[in-house]
Amino acid sequence: MRTRLLSFAFWLAAVGLIVFLNFHFQGQTGVFRGIAETSEITVTTESAAEITQIFVTQGQTVHAGDTLVRLKRPDLDLRLQQINRESQHVQGQTSASSSDIDRRVGEVRAALNTRSNQIRLEIRQLQDLRKRSQELAERLQVRTAPASDSSQAVTLQIKALERELALAENSAQSQVALLQGSRGMQHSSGQAQASSLSEESRLISSEKSRLVILATQTGVIGTINYHAGEKVNPFNPILTLMAPTPTLVRGYLQENATSPLHAGDTVKVVSSLEGSAIDGQVVGLGTRIIELPLRLRRISTIAVWGREVTIRIAPQNRLLLGELVSIEPRIKGASR
């Protein structure tokens, strides 16, 4: 009889244990557990570069604007030197061209001045000759045809010289205008080249400024993957920066839970250390069943499966990174 009672008690305890395990691992409703985590910012570079200095260490707290990493790109420095040489060459060419045009304009004007003086001198001489001939004819009271023909010939010579003077002046003005127009075109071309080089220099300087990487927010340095002197390829993670407090909770809803959550639902997140609670909002639900992390198993040797639930929480909280928390649904999202 006693043996039967012991056997009955054993089987009763076994059934109770099975019910207990089933309640906790397969059918628990409402409250589930998760781990407080934070989002990470990955620090990368857009182009291949060499790390000259890393100013932080793993676990260090930094503030927005602090210098994290300084990089070096020799190709940018080389191109800047080339741009400076090209700019000096363009300036020299423009100055030399302007001086050459000024010299040629001066030569044209000097030649015009010389030729116009000669023509004016000849005109004055012919005018004086005509005047003396007229005065002589008047004194001698000569009114013969040959005298009139001589005066007309001198007048024609004077008019021819005046036309030649006008043509010389017009030709010189045209040459000067052409030279000055050429100077304007060369000046515009030089300005365009200088502007293009200046813009390229500005872009390179802007790109060089990005070689000094600053913290975009206050946080804690996570992993550091490189050392000073090493070369890094584009978009390879140099280091990570984490928020100083958890900003999200990654919970795990057991697969047979009877209280499914939906995106937008509000939940209560309770600290396992202090018991304090804060509100959170469901922002993501896993689309597949996965095995829960070992920390979330009540018995480490028994695998438990469920859906991952991502919950966003305010950064102003007292949770610790990696802390275990309890999650309790409170208010369903309005979208439901």
Image (tube, rainbow, N blue to C red):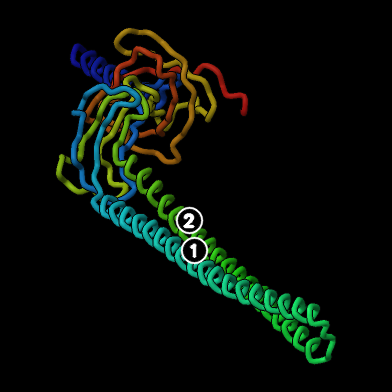
Classify residue 326 as left or right of residue 263: left
Q: Is residue 229 above or below residue 174?
A: above
Estimate the x, y position of residue 98 in percent, counting from the top left: 45, 61
Which quadrant of the rendered structure holds the N terminus?
top left
**Could you tell me which residue is drawn at 30 percent across and 36 percent down?**
213
Is 313 located above or below residue 44 in the figure?
A: above
Evaluate whether residue 108 shows in this view: yes
Image position of 162 (left or right of 211) = right
The residue closer to the viewer here, 100 or 58, is: 100
Residue 293 location, quadrant: top left
Between 151 and 95, the residue placed more toward the observer is 151
Q: In the orientation shown, which residue stands out farthest toward the bottom?
A: 146
Residue 318 percent location from the top left of the image: 34, 12
**Quadrant in which residue 63 is drawn:** top left
Check disc 1 and report its element: helix, strand or loop: helix
Left or right placement of residue 217 versus residue 193 in this view: left
Dot 2: what SS? helix
Dot 1 crowding, Cα within 10 Å, few <14, some 14–19, many 20+: some
Q: Which mark is residue 191?
A: 2
Residue 280 lies, in percent from the top left, at 46, 20
For disc 2, the neighbor class at 10 Å (few under 14, some 14 to 19, many from 20) is: some
The three-letter code of the residue at mark 2 reads Gln
Pointer 1: what residue? 186
Which of the 4 image quadrants contains residue 246? Answer: top left
Kind of residue sitting beneath label 1: Gln
- Relative image position of residue 287 (x, y in whole percent): 45, 40
- Image side of residue 11 versus residue 197, left or right: left
Which one is in front in this view, the residue at disc 2 or the one at disc 1?
A: 1
Residue shown at 18% from the left, 37% from the top = 53
